Image (cartoon, rainbow, N blue to C red):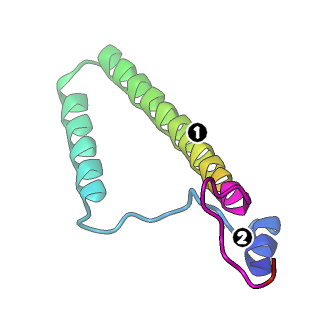
Amino acid sequence: MRKILENFYFGNITPSEREMKTNSNLHRAVDRAARCEGQLTERIGEAEQVLLTELVKAQHEIDSITALENFILGFRLGVRMMAECMDENDGEIREVTDYG
């Protein structure tokens, strides 16, 4: 466990840095989006291209914010689950032990 904390402290853990697997559903969706964006860019005028670029940038920003928020929410849920595991209140049933 200590090694993970040390790596986190020294900045060696970066959850957002990942590589897409080739031929995965995500990879195919990204390719499809890029293809559609390219086709749209070829068919529209310069003013519309600027608007399309702004739309794509805004969607990327939304995706980044959403990914960060989901990461934090998931991490918090995991910590809450671990904290609950440490709770000694087992409801109506308690563990039978020889030591008390």
Specify whether 86 is left or right of 23. Answer: right
- Give the percent coordinates (x, y) of residue 31: 25, 51
Place of residue 21 in the rendered image (x, y in percent of width and height, measured from the top left): 34, 68
Disc with the residue nearer the chain's start (1 vs 2)? 2
Q: Residues within 10 Å of mark 2 (few under 14, many from 20)?
A: few
- Residue annotated with mark 2: 12
Dominant SS of magenta comes to loop
Q: Which residue lies furthest to the bottom in this view?
A: 98
Quadrant in the picture for the C terminus: bottom right
Type of the residue with mark 2: Asn
Give, as a three-letter code, the residue at label 1.
Answer: Glu
* Label annotation for residue 79: none
Q: Position of residue 79 (x, y in %)?
A: 68, 54
The image shows residue 81, relative to residue 100, as above or below, that is above
The magenta region covers: 82-98
Density class for disc 1 (Cα within 10 Å; few <14, some 14-19, many ≥20) is few
Element on which disc 2 rests: loop
Determine the residue positioned at 29% across, 58% down.
27
* Viewer-closest of 46 and 35: 35
Residue drawn at 65 percent across, 58 percent down:
90
Image spot of residue 86 (x, y percent): 73, 62
Checking the image for residue 69, the label placed there is 1
> Is 67 drawn above or below residue 16 in the view shown?
above
Q: Viewer-proximal residue, 34 or 43?
A: 34
Disc nearest the viewer among 1 and 2: 1
Classify the position of the N terminus by image quarter: bottom right
Q: Quadrant of residue 97?
A: bottom right
- Up-down relation of residue 1 to residue 19 (above or below): below
Disc 1 is placed on an element classified as helix
In the displayed structure, does residue 97 sit left or right of residue 100?
left
The residue nearer to you, when weighing 93 against 12, is 93
Q: How many labels does the image show?
A: 2
